[in-house]
């Protein structure tokens, strides 16, 4: 073993440091995903997902290849290590990797355009108190096909984000309260 000095990069995660904090980012990795999708010159947008899809979809010769779709989604899943803001969108898109439809390709392109505008986002790790704070939320029957709810939660240790998850619940909740309770139970299990 030999000393290589202070860490600057590890598994495509770039690490910047100041006196009291570190910043983890994957800008170069995100740019490589945009290059793979041939969207390096796209116009950025402010939101990674949309609630209302258009009636008709323009065909996309590059992203309509199912193998490329799966490769990009896999890369985006790795990118969520430092980008919790795209976790929900990546979760939705990864549910259709076996057969992406035009609406999924539209949503993927939208996510990549969001990524283009937020390349400089990173995760700060700061010296602070060690109080644990956690938050959870759920949308009741958010999946229009299965009527399952989506759970999301995250935890902070001081001012540092240490854990986050977005996933579809395993059963159909009969009420909003039940979906929120399941999300909270998953958070508590993660905290423990």
Image (cartoon, rainbow, N blue to C red):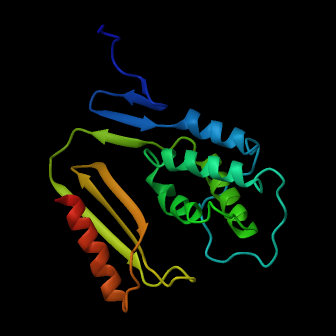
Quadrant housing residue 38: top right
Q: Position of residue 98 (x, y in %)?
A: 63, 62
Q: Residue at x 72, y 55 (%)?
A: 66
Question: Compared with residue 133, is residue 51 higher up or lower down, i.e. above or below?
Answer: below
Question: Compared with residue 51, is residue 48 higher up or lower down, i.e. above or below?
Answer: above
- With 129 as the anchor, is 147 left or right in this view? right
Q: Residue at x 32, y 80 (%)?
A: 180
- With 16 as the anchor, is 27 left or right in this view? right
Quadrant assignment for the C terminus: bottom left
Task: Give 81 or 96, whichever is nearer the viewer.
Answer: 96
Residue at the farthest top position: 2
Q: Residue at x 72, y 64 (%)?
A: 106
- With 6 as the anchor, is 157 left or right in this view? left
Q: Position of residue 22 (x, y in %)?
A: 34, 33
Question: Compared with residue 20, is residue 91 higher up or lower down, i.e. above or below?
Answer: below
Residue at the farthest bottom position: 174
Count the marks: how many?
0
Q: Residue at x 70, y 48 (%)?
A: 68
Quadrant assignment for the N terminus: top left
Task: Give 192 or 132, whichever is nearer the viewer.
Answer: 192
Q: Position of residue 177 (x, y in %)?
A: 31, 87
Q: Position of residue 160 (x, y in %)?
A: 28, 47
């Amino acid at each position: 073993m030999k000393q290589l000095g202070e860490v600057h990069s590890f598994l495509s995660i770039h690490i910047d440091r100041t006196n009291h904090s570190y910043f983890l980012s994957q800008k170069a990795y995100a740019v490589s995903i945009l290059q793979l999708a041939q969207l390096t010159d796209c116009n950025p947008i402010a939101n990674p997902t949309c609630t209302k899809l258009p009636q008709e979809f323009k065909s996309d010769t590059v992203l309509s290849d199912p193998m490329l779709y799966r490769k990009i989604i896999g890369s985006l899943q790795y990118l969520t290590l430092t980008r919790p803001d795209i976790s929900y969108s990546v979760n939705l898109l990864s549910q259709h990797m076996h057969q992406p439809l035009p609406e999924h390709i539209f949503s993927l392109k939208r996510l990549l355009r969001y990524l283009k505008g937020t390349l400089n986002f990173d995760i700060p790790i700061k010296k602070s108190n060690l109080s644990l704070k956690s938050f959870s939320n759920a949308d009741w029957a958010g999946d229009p096909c299965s009527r399952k709810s989506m759970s999301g939660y995250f935890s902070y240790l001081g001012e540092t984000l240490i854990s986050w998850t977005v996933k579809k619940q395993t059963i159909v909740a009969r009420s909003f309260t039940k979906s929120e309770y399941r999300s909270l139970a998953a958070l508590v299990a993660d905290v423990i």
